Image: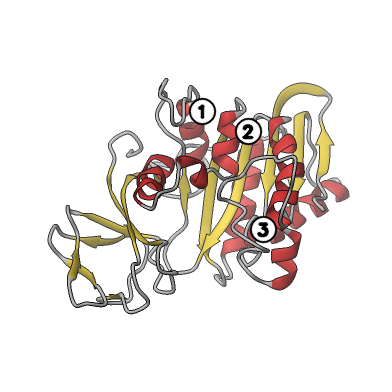
């Protein structure tokens, strides 16, 4: 089902895996990975150290359907299972061992609403129960070299709080990057732009080549880190409660809001307002009732440069 393409250098080095089309309607990563494969095959790029694993299409069923998911969201509750029940369970049985056999993941995505590309990182180093981690500096260094000017963290803890309110658990928020960290690796998600943005495949391609150079898998200088970086942290997730819940306007990710500003209106007429000065992230006007409607983020000094 998954068809990885693997290249090995003659010298020791990191083991990098790059994923495209974890969500089937997010094709920029697949296009960029195919471009890199063509250049490696033609000798215009060469892996001189470490190992590179390229997966242009992680979710074949969703990709062929042109949909986000095959049977469900692959980037939720990602874990191997002895009794796979759906398409994404079967993919997890192949993908999870593949991730565990590598040490760095670059996962290429795009998003529904407009806006500039951005990177998503894991937590700060910690020994907590939710997502213990010790490679925050490595992720941050990589994110600074992907060619974007915005980085965000706080995904799993924010998702876990929302899942708890719904009666679920934090495992629902585990996707490729969270799984990679759980098996000792580090990972960065790059959101390359809006799904149909013609520049998104170029954003993804540049990120792959910059990552190869940064990790010394190819014979090229380490890219200079971004001169400026806007750092944000997800703080809250607001669920849609009813099909009649509506946004006050057509929000885009990273639109600024002031504390008390009306973001939407519930079906019964009550206002949904911002609890603090911040930014709307991942607004979904078509969200199913009981699922994430939008997130809220605030500036984060750790990731700001």
Is disc 3 surrounded by few (<14), some (14 to 19) or many (20+) residues within 10 Å?
many
- Residue at x 50%, y 37% (from the top left corner): 224
Of marks 2 and 1, which one's residue comes earlier in the chain?
2
Specify few, some or many for label 1: CA neighbours under 10 Å numbering under 14, 14-19, or 20 or more. few
Few, some or many C-alpha atoms within 10 Å of disc 2 (few <14, some 14-19, many ≥20)? many
Q: Which residue is mark 1?
A: 138
Task: Point out residue 128 in the picture as x, y percentages from the top left corner.
Answer: 40, 24
Q: Secondary structure at mark 3?
A: loop
**Split into 4 quadrants, where in the image is the C terminus?**
top left
Secondary structure type for disc 1: helix
Q: Is residue 112 above or below residue 160?
A: below
Contact flag, marks 2 and 3 (Cβ < 8 Å): no
Q: Which residue is mark 3?
A: 21
Question: Sequence-wise, which precedes: disc 2 or disc 3?
Answer: 3
Location of residue 104 (image quadrant): top right
**Nearer the observer, 39 or 81:** 81
């Amino acid at each position: 089902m998954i068809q990885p393409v693997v290249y090995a250098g003659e010298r020791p080095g990191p083991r990098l895996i790059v994923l495209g089309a974890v969500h089937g309607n997010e094709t920029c990563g697949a296009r960029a990975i195919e471009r890199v494969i063509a250049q490696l095959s033609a000798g215009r790029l060469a892996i001189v150290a470490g190992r590179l694993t390229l997966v242009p299409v992680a979710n074949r069923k969703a990709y062929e359907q042109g949909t986000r998911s095959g049977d469900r969201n692959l980037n939720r509750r990602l874990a191997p299972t002895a009794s796979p029940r759906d398409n994404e369970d079967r993919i997890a049985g192949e993908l999870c061992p593949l991730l565990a056999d590598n040490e760095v993941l670059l996962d290429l995505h795009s998003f529904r609403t407009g806006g500039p590309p951005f990177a998503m990182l894991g937590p700060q180093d910690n020994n907590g129960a939710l997502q213990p981690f010790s490679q925050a500096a490595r992720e941050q260094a990589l994110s600074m070299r992907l060619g974007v000017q915005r980085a965000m963290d706080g995904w799993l803890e924010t998702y876990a709080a929302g899942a708890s309110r719904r009666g679920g658990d934090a495992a629902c928020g585990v996707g490729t990057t969270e799984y990679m960290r759980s098996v000792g690796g580090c990972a960065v998600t790059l959101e390359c732009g809006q799904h149909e943005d013609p520049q998104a495949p170029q954003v993804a391609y540049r990120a792959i080549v910059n990552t190869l150079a940064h990790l010394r898998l190819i014979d090229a200088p380490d890219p200079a880190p971004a001169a400026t970086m806007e750092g944000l942290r997800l703080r809250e997730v607001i669920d849609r409660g009813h099909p009649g819940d509506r946004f006050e306007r057509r929000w885009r990710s990273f639109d600024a809001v002031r504390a008390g500003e009306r973001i939407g209106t519930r079906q019964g007429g009550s206002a949904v307002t911002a609890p603090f000065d911040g930014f709307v992230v991942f607004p979904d006007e078509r969200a199913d009732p009981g699922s994430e409607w939008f997130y809220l983020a605030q500036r984060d000094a750790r990731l700001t440069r």
